[in-house]
């Protein structure tokens, strides 16, 4: 009996002292993380996956890691939150109950010097990222132009951001540059061009774009020689690049994408749906005052305020 107890004790001691040969997986190992998100999202070898570097996150004890997935012309970014020990991964949006749920995007959507219509200081701001060669953008543009100002003459301000998808639309960038050239000369004429280019979308191609634009400009308050030079030398391309970069920063992966006081609406939106969102925001902002446009419309003289 004593020999049996001795053997059991020795066997237990060996088991406890044996090294753990099974290596513990960690999300901080990029190969492990990539394999995991591939399995999670059913991403085969045709999807290229880039794991970003960790950065601070709003979740205590977790770091944010952005995963960039791409296949040909399509790409998207996904945020994951990884625990300090690399054992837990959280995917989703993080909200601060004390803040507007769309504050992150609102802080990024800088609209200074962008084409706009509507009332400065309006309680609802629409920001659209669009592509002049995109068929769904054409449909949404008409819906917006036909309805927004006539329905909300004072409650809405609309901003247009060029986001040409160069990989699939060969003349979208050139059209965006032309639009900016026109905007630089005459802000009101920009909207004439906006409506015209979408209405004539099917007639335009990479070869005839410049001639079409110059024909459009005839008879308008636009210097056609200056416009031609601006287009030829791509003088406004930096402005297009800027709105494109802003779009990427807020995660634009498709056009049209419309923000309503920071609320993201991807793809073509019908008017009843958009009107419902706008009506809700108008009522909400009467008490919330955490979105809309801070236009800085009030001019104040320096010095103490007298009552």
Image: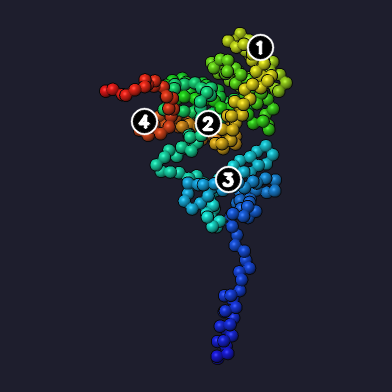
Where does the image place residue 59, in percent across and percent down from the top left?
Answer: 47, 49
Looking at the image, residue 260 lies above or below residue 191: below
Depicted 29 relative to depicted 197: above or below: below
Residue receiving disc 2: 258
Query: Taking the image as drawn, is residue 76 in sight?
Result: yes
Residue 147 appears in the figure = no
Q: Is mark 4 on a helix, strand or loop?
A: helix
Query: Which is more foreground, mark 2 or mark 1?
Result: 1
How packed mark 3 is, by other alpha carbons closer than 10 Å (few <14, some 14-19, many 20 or more), is some
- Residue depicted at x 62% and y 26%: 238
* 30 left or right of 250 in image: right
Position of residue 133 in the picture relative to residue 157 (left or right): right
Name the residue nearer the viewer: 261 or 66: 66
Q: On the image, numbered disc 1 is attached to which residue?
A: 225
Q: Which residue in the protein does label 3 denote?
A: 66
Residue at the image point whose x is 59% and y is 29% from the top: 242
Answer yes or no: do the residues labelled 3 and 1 have beta carbons within 8 Å? no
Name the residue at 60% across, 17% down.
182
Label 1 element class = helix
- Of labels 4 and 1, earlier in sequence is 1
* Precedes in sequence: disc 4 or disc 2: 2
Please tell me which residue lies in front, 245 or 202. Answer: 245
- Extreme top residue here? 219
**Regarding mark 2 in the picture, which secondary structure is present there?**
strand
Which label's residue is closer to the chain start, 4 or 3? 3
Q: Label for residue 286? A: 4
Graded by Cα atoms within 10 Å as few (under 14), some (14 to 19) or many (20 or more), the crowding at tag 1 reads: few
Residue 128 % position (x, y): 54, 29
Question: CA gap, disc 4 to disc 3?
Answer: 36 Å
């Amino acid at each position: 009996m004593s020999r049996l107890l001795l053997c059991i004790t020795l066997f237990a001691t060996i088991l406890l002292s044996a090294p753990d040969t099974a290596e513990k997986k960690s999300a901080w190992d990029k190969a492990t993380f990539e394999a995991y998100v591939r399995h999670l999202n059913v991403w085969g070898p045709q999807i290229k996956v880039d794991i970003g570097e960790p950065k601070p996150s709003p979740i205590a004890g977790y770091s944010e890691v952005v995963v960039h997935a791409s296949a040909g012309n399509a790409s998207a970014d996904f945020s994951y939150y990884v625990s300090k020990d690399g054992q837990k991964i959280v995917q989703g949006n993080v909200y601060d109950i004390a803040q507007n749920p769309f504050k992150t995007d609102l802080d990024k959507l800088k609209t200074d010097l962008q084409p706009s219509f509507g009332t400065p200081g309006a309680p609802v701001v629409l920001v659209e990222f669009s592509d002049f060669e995109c068929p769904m953008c054409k449909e949404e543009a008409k819906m917006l132009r036909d309805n927004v100002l006539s329905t909300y003459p004072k409650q809405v301000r609309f901003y247009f951001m060029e986001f040409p998808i160069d990989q699939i639309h060969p003349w979208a960038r050139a059209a965006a540059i032309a639009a900016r050239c026109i905007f630089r000369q005459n802000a009101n004429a920009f909207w004439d061009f906006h409506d015209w280019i979408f209405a004539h979308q099917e007639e335009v191609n990479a070869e005839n774009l410049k001639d079409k634009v110059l024909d459009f400009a005839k008879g308008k308050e636009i210097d056609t020689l200056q416009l031609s030079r601006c287009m030829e030398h791509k003088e406004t391309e930096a402005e297009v690049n800027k709105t494109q970069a802003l779009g990427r920063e807020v995660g634009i992966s498709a056009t049209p994408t419309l923000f309503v006081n920071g609320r993201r609406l991807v793809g073509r939106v019908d008017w009843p749906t958009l009107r419902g969102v706008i009506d809700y925001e108008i009522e909400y902002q009467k008490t919330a005052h955490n979105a809309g446009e801070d236009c800085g419309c009030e001019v104040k003289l320096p010095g103490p305020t007298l009552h």
